[in-house]
Image (cartoon, rainbow, N blue to C red):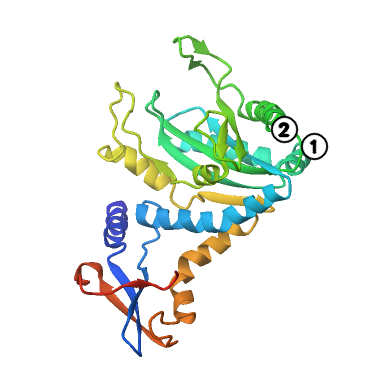
Amino acid sequence: MREIFEKKVATDIGECGNLINIQRCVNCGTQYFAGYHCCKTRWCFNCLNKRLLCWMKRAMPIFQAWYDEGNFCSLLDFTVRDAMPLNTPLQNLEDSWRKLYNGSGPRRKKWNERFPGGIRSLEVKVGKDSGEWHPHYHCLVMQKYGSYEKDYYWVSEIWHELLGHNGPALKKDGTPDFDWNGNVWIKKVTTEKVEKRRYQVNLIDAVAETLKYIVKVDDSLDSDKNRNFYKDKELFQDVFYTLKGKRQTSTWGLMYGLGKQVDEDMKNDNYEKLIDFVCQKCGCTESELIQKIYADIGEDTVLLDLKK
């Protein structure tokens, strides 16, 4: 059953984008590109890129308006100790986040006061030094007052408290570090253009960083392990089945419900073009939808984008 399921997903990804939707004006015959068939799997970079653009379309105006009102944002990354198999560090990450965000009492109250809204996404990659799975959360949080530095201290303290100390990890000099089991990183988000800095990032880059692909393939793995994401079947199956059904992106507070709008954008893009059709050449408002295989579209075929 596993192999059948894997082959089906691989087939869907291979055929993604092959079927092109063309909207043809019934009056003058002018043809317009009206989207393409999406497989909508999380392993398809075609669909992931489209979903990222839909998220950017929805999220950027909200964050920009937030800054226009005199507020600011920070980029928070939550990590846990690398481990194998993937379910081990991922479960640790999910449980710790649940206690941080859903906890009752002063902790939950303070979180909501300091971060009244935000986006959280999961990214999974293989640790460069460890050669083991490194799942982590990217969070773009909205803030009304205070400073991102001060917020970092109490969030970091709580995160370390939730993770606990589960044995030694090695420091850079090779000596054991008995206190490390994960960390919190923070970056100041600005609407101004900035050079790439460790603790400062532009707003549009912060949104893109938060919403990027769920899996990051890194070929520069530990030489002793010598693992390659594409060639190691056991490694791929681990991430493939562990992430099945897992939500990559979620929102809270002032950003709540944004994910549903993105899902609608992914599904209804073509229908919106059909309903709002107006031929740019002759002004006719009637059209017919044609589906063609991408490879069969000739060079003489004119495809005009409806949205200028």
Quick check: can you spot residue 44? no
Which residue is outermost to the bottom? Answer: 27
Whether label 2 touches label 1, CB < 8 Å: no
Q: In this view, does 272 lie above or below 165?
A: below
| Residue under the point 58% across and 45% down | 120
Mark 2, residue position = 147
Please provide percent x and percent y for residue 108: 74, 41
The Cα atoms of the two marked residues, 2 and 1, are separated by 20 Å
The disc labelled 2 sits on which kind of residue?
Ser
Quadrant of the rendered image containing residue 21 = bottom left
- In the picture, measured across the screen, residue 73 lies left or right of residue 133, that is right
Q: Quadrant of the N terminus?
A: bottom left
- Nearest to the eye among marks 2 and 1: give it: 2
The disc labelled 1 sits on which kind of residue?
Pro
| Mark 1 nearby-residue class (10 Å; few <14, some 14–19, many ≥20) | few
Dot 2 or dot 1, earlier in sequence:
1
Mark 1, residue position = 106
- In the picture, measured across the screen, residue 43 lies left or right of residue 267, that is left
The one nearer the camera, 50 or 285, is 285
Quick check: can you spot residue 80? yes
| Residue under the point 48% across and 71% down | 268
Q: Is mark 1 on a helix, strand or loop?
A: helix
| Residue under the point 56% across and 15% down | 178
